[in-house]
Amino acid sequence: MVREAVWSFPEAQPDRRTFRADWSQALQLKTDRQWSPVAIGLMVNAAMLLGILVVLIAHGRGQVVSTAFADVPQQAPIAGGGGVFVMPAQLHRDVWGCYLVDVDRQTLCTYEYRSGERALVLTAARHFRYDLSLKNFNTYPAWYDLQKMVDDEANAQRSTESKPPVQNPESTPPAQ
């Protein structure tokens, strides 16, 4: 049931002076108000954070965030430090393990986790210093074939740019 106020009778209408006086009393601020300790703590905390922000802006000449965060390179999900890196790997369909790379010693090791034995087993190790010296090993197409294709394409591009455009002999006017 919705109740509506109907001001149809002149004696039922409120006095406008009384109505204004009620609102003015409601809007007056009390000067004897007691602040709770939580409110005081929040205000002090906000003031301190504002002070820290002002110091950061003033010290960094308007730059709040360091430029070190601007261009963070994306890395593979590996863990490591000091030249030794570990990367998890799925070695076979149901076989998991990890690769261990020692950059200083230039060594790559593969470890396999055997769940039945509950052991991490070294399955392969290789010194890759001399591998990095190879230019063309077990690859197709060979690097020199790719180089020849790139050179041929560049020569073809240069030859088409250096030739003048060919005019249609029918479209040229006869010489008089």
Image (cartoon, rainbow, N blue to C red):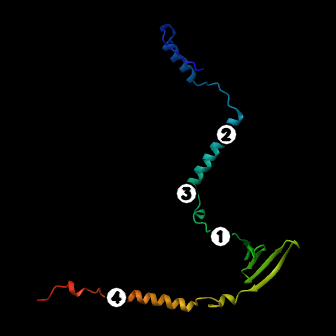
Look at the picture and state if 70 lies above or below 116.
above
Element type where label 4 sits in the image: helix
Q: Is residue 87 visible?
A: no
Which of pointers 3 and 2 lies earlier in the amino acid sequence? 2
Look at the picture and state if 144 lies above or below 125.
below
Q: Position of residue 57 (x, y in %)?
A: 56, 53
User: Which is nearer the eye, 133 or 173?
Assistant: 173
Q: Position of residue 49 (x, y in %)?
A: 63, 47
- State the separation of the CA atoms marked 2 and 4: 77 Å
Kindly indicate the quadrant of the structure image that contains residue 102: bottom right
Badge nearest the viewer, 4 or 3: 4
Q: Is residue 110 visible?
A: yes
Badge nearest the viewer, 1 or 2: 1
Q: How many marks?
A: 4
The numbered disc on residue 63 is 3
Element type where label 1 sits in the image: loop
